[in-house]
Amino acid sequence: MNAPAKIETTLKDWETDQEVRWCPGCGDYAILKAVQRTLPQLGVDPANTVFISGIGCSSRFPYYMESYGFHTIHGRAPALATGVKLANPELNIWLVTGDGDGLSIGGNHMMHVLRRNVDMQIMLFNNEIYGLTKGQYSPTSRVGTPSPSTPRGSVDAPANPCAFALGSGARFVARGFDVSKNLPDVLKAAHAHRGAAFIEIFQNCIVYNKDVFDDFAAPKGAEDRQLWLEDGKPMLFGSEKSGGVKGLALDTETLAFRVVDVPDGDWESAGVRVHNAKNRVTAHLLAELPFGPYPMALGVLYDDPAPTFSDSVIAEHEAASKGKEANLAKLLGTGQTWTVDGTAQDPV
Amino acid sequence: MASAAETNTRDEASNNSEAAPDAIVVRFAGDSGDGMQLTGGQFTLSTALAGNDLATFPDFPAEIRAPQGTLFGVSAFQINFGSREINTAGDAPDVLVAMNPAALKVNLPALKSGGLVIVDTGEFSKRNLDKAKYDANPLEDDTLAKYDVLAFDISELTIQAVEPFGLGKKDALRSKNMWTLGLALWMFDRPREPIHNWLKQKFAKKPDIADANIAALDAGHAYGETAELAGPRSGAMRQTNMPPVDSEPGLYRTITGAESISLGLVAGAQLAELPMFFGGYPITPASAILHHLARLKEYGVTTFQAEDEIAAICAAIGASYAGSLGVTSSSGPGIALKTEAMGLAIMTELPLVIVNSQRGGPSTGLPTKTEQSDLYQAVYGRNGDAPMPVIAARSPGDAFECAIEACRIAVKYMTPVMLLTDGYIANAAEPWKVPDPSSYEPFPATFLTEKNGETLLPYARDEKGARPWIKPGTPGLMHRIGGIEKAQGTGHIDYAPDNHQAMTDARKHKVLGVTVPEQEVSLGQKGGKLAVVGWGSTFGPIHQAVRRMRAKGCDVSHIHVRHIWPLPANLGDLLNSYERVLVPEMNTGQFKTVLRDQYLVDAEPLTKTSGQPFQIAELEDAIGKYFDGIEGNEGGQVPVNDQQLPNLSAGYDSGSSKDMD
């Protein structure tokens, strides 16, 4: 829900007097700055904005935002935020969670806040590790991740946050990473979407999982490894300098994308598909695109609004209350009643 | 017919069978598909309309549709009604209606000697007898020798009655319960019109079904009127007319605890001038509150069926944070899941009402039975020093007052409050004098709208120790709260030792400082030989047992505690005024422990954890031991009583909404 009147603020207006306590070099700093830089551009009112988080490094976020904030309990932020939104649908809610908070202990709530389509921006900081508890592997850690709890490497397959979100019925799914210059655009798109907007933000844990995203996030060679999606634009990556422009074409036989060369910028002849953010099927393909043979799909994978939970609840409320009088005295005396004769006042 | 459970012990009953009863206990029992709960409910309504006082207990299997005809599929509904004040659903039935062999097998041991059994012979086939594990037909041997028996083919009589409506046999037999209800209405001289009207309303879209049921009801009634109903021992069955009870004038209705809590919460939210947000998750027996509130949207009630118990309470906390009155409800296992979030509400000092409809046992335990074993959980059951006010309702009607009180404390003190009820209170019905909502003192919530200091102090405290309530959306008051320890005043994160000490003390003193009414003596006087101290739904049987023992000349008083935490300020002094203190509880002695701890009083437990409620006679026996001159036999555990109610379906006792003092 976006505040109707635009409010003028600066980045400074969104900073609190609290000392930021993330490790030096943590990707969270970059995300904090990106959010503080984006909110003034959105014209939102700090008094009408609520940051709600669970538990973990990422969940300290609300303390650093000069808005309303609620640092809740592990995994439960989506449930608590749902109550906030239903009690006051005018509030602009940003949920801050991590891969452990949002997909492990709070996976159930994440699924339901998405399928209900509760209007809020959900930022899931994915660092593929439990940071605050000192480095155990997380539900998004890659197989073989060594950690204090998996000294010989983890053996279980990781969850894919964007695929999870789509599977849960999310109507907006996007991806970015901490130091990306495109992150503010992704946040803006999420804010513009009415309903639950899920953003996976790859975040570098400098202490326990250092540079684990460098294979696609490092500046060098980024253009070959990052596919930034734009609705209505061909899905192109790479450059002439780096080894040629490439694109994603759809193989109708295998129902999978394949990478094709795009000589001379003629992407149409090369069969490159135009990204349609309303196409749920291609959103799934993009979310699950295996990195390595393919680039990392970033930006807005899917954006197709549907009625929001609070709007539906309000509509139902209005329909159910229409023409009805809220007379408590009458309600108490409802049903089959009888009177014992005497002088007592009849309350109805 | 034997006289009432409450005025006579079982032994006395058989000697007294000619006396005109001032109360009668009737139990309807049948297969869970036979509609016994509906029959009981409508009989209750006709009883209330006749002006009798009453208490009921519905007892049904945990299985939705247990295999037909089996012992564990038996569903029963017991009602105790009379021309005098009724506090319990009765120790043992005077009349048992058994719709099949299984219902007879399960419920017969409970029936008073000389009581009346009404059976449907049409159901006593070899197959059904086998399912009920009867080797021989109990209608043909001496199983029923000590009872009056009215045995006839209710199934066939029902089929005949509904024949004009052209229903198939299966559908026709669905009206059996209405035929039986018709007979019961005749037996107690009740009008049929209210039931006719109810049937027409219920089946408004299927007038044929309504007419068939009305025909069955009328046929049952006519059968009573015209047939010669002869029991083997007492001759012809007669009509019994129960005169109305002497009641305070006013408007009355029947109410169950679930309805009463729902209405009390709505009233509480109105008195606080707040919209209500109710977060719930399906669980027996608490779901009924969610169902009731879901239909009250025009009263500013938002109900949210969450994905789990944790989400239900977290959403309620979120709603309270945003300025609504957050409410959640569950039963023991669900309350356990909510525990961490309760700590969050305590830490963030937000109002919240948590209703716990207690059921039996740990884990899944006995989902449809009642127990009082969540008291430790309510008072002590959280990590850290996490104090929370706890209130316990004693009866369906009383739950209305308790719900309002819970809302009041939550809003005035910025704290979660737990309201304890139990499976019995949730489902049982009793007559309720409809209160006038304008007679309650409002307690409007206030929200901070501007800074309360040089800088904003979200954790500044008022004279009650409560912090300000600040709604997000309020300009200029942006601040952050959470589960991490807060600095006094500013609410910033603060792990300093002296701060945690001060905040722990502040939370403790705020809750201990909650104003609760002075403890009164429910029956008897301050001081003397023995106080029987109870809480929750044991009010009814304790009250009646104390009344009867006092009539026999024993110096015993009844103290009923509503405010479990904090306890009334004068309670310690009051308890110490008695030579002995007995605490009957449907648990292993939880409130007893609290009283011992708080007052160093030698409270003695009387416990019962068989899944059955206390009977009045059991409590009389226990009280009697303080007056029999034998040392050391007091208190202890009530032995399992298989005569009381079948092992398969434990029953309930109730209290009344009336002021007994």
Image: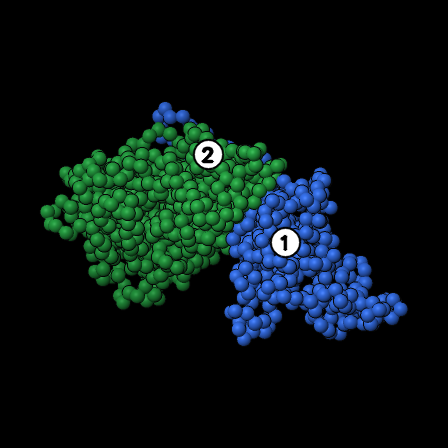
Chain colours: A blue, B green
Crowding at label 2, few (<14), some or many (≥20) Cα neighbours within 10 Å? few
Number of callouts: 2
Q: Secondary structure at mark 1?
A: strand
Crowding at label 1, few (<14), some or many (≥20) Cα neighbours within 10 Å? many
Residue that protrudes farthest toward the left in the picture: B629
Mark 1 belongs to which subunit?
A
* In the foreground, A228 or A258: A228
Q: Inspect this view and state whether residue B192 appears.
A: no
Residue that protrudes farthest toward the right in the picture: A264
Q: Secondary structure at mark 2?
A: loop
Q: Inspect this view and state whether residue B473 appears.
A: yes
Q: Which mark is residue A122?
A: 1
Would residue A173 appear left or right of A268 to someone viewing this image? Answer: left
Discs 2/1, front? 2
* In the foreground, B27 or A165: A165
Asked if the residue at tag 1 contacts the one at tag 2, i.e. Cβ–Cβ closer than 8 Å, the answer is no
In the rendered image, residue B211, in percent from the top left (x then y), is placed at 47, 46
Residue A156 lies in quadrant: bottom right
Residue at image coords 22%, 35%: B526
Would residue A81 appear left or right of B264 to someone viewing this image? Answer: right
Would residue A110 appear left or right of A275 to someone viewing this image? Answer: left
For the residue marked with disc 2, what is the amino acid?
Asp
Residue at image coords 57%, 57%: A57
